[in-house]
Image (cartoon, rainbow, N blue to C red):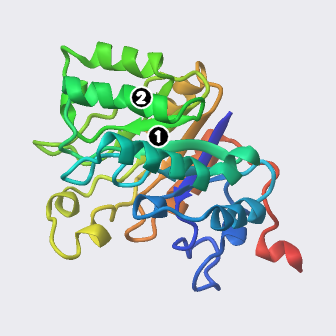
Amino acid sequence: MITIGLTTWSEHQSLLPEKKQLTLVDYAGFFPTVEIDSLFYGLKTPAQVQKWADAVPAGFQFIVKATSAMTQHDKEPLAEAELAQLFQRYRGAIKPLVQAHKLKTILLQFPPFFKLTPANIRYLIQVRQLLPKLPVAIEFRNPTWYDQLYVGEMVALMQRLQFTLVAADEPQTKVNSVPFYPTVTNPKLGLFRLHGRNMAGWLNQDKQWRGKRTLYRYNQQELLQFATAVKTMAQTAQEVCVIFNNNSGGDAADNALALQQLLGIEFHGLGPKQLDLF
């Protein structure tokens, strides 16, 4: 099975040009999954998460980001007891999605300074202990994890911990870029996250950086290459999910629909589109 989705649901005006801002209900008429990054900045209440689950059809699923503290973005890591409490609160927050079978995976996107070290390997093992039996996807942003000497052991670690290793597409800078590395480490789920290839926007971390770094529209040839990689991964993974994150200029939805067409797939069980109501 191949699924496609976008980050957030409100920013994709090209899907419904007549609406200034899309709702989750609107979005669910086009795609069967969405990535939510708001938990990175702070936990939601179970009641808020329950509203998300109630707003979408039975087959719809969410990818939810871990909080910044869970991925060690904070300069001072939490003490063991505090960390355990945070993970417990996080599990409680997303419990409505788990109970409704609408959690596709928890995404841990580690910062560029999260290098391949013995301490960080131990932390990944700890993550699995703190998120037992829950689906987890790992995205590295430091190239040391893909060093030729260690990449085989890294992949074996992901397999042992039953983590999905994210295949990220991003600008290839001289430092702190990871290669596009599609491989199946969890037979249940393969995950692509496509950030665009805007080199200038990726490197220039000024005040407008967050609004420019994913300003990129994939062309037909690039989408064809992704389609090939997706089909290959789908031969060994039960599900392959593709998330487009290149939305600084509103390109994600158009690219996602184009890839869907190239793959020749249809999504069933979607919510009613706005035009279907008339």
Is 236 on the left-hand or right-hand side of 172? right
| Quarter occupied by the C terminus | bottom right
Contact (CB < 8 A) between labels 2 and 1? yes
Give the image location of residue 269, x and y in percent: 82, 51
* 277 up-or-down from 106: above or below: below
In percent of width and height, residue 92 lies at 60, 51
Q: Is residue 222 visible?
A: no
Residue at 58% in and 31% down: 189
User: Mark 2 Cα within 10 Å, few/some/many (few <14, many 20+)?
Assistant: some
Instruction: Judge from the rendering whether residue 101 lies leftward or rightward of residue 184; answer left or right.
Output: right
Q: Residue at x 64, y 68 (%)?
A: 48
Residue type at mark 1? Phe
Q: Residue at x 53, y 23 (%)?
A: 186
Q: Secondary structure at mark 2?
A: loop
Residue 182 is labelled as 2
Which numbered disc flags the more N-terminal residue, 2 or 1? 2
User: Distance from label 2 to label 1 (Cα)?
Assistant: 8 Å
Q: What is the residue that sits farthest to the left in this orientation?
A: 174
Residue type at tag 2: Pro
Image height of 25 relative to 124, above or below: below
Q: In this figure, which residue is indicated by the disc labeled 1?
A: 192
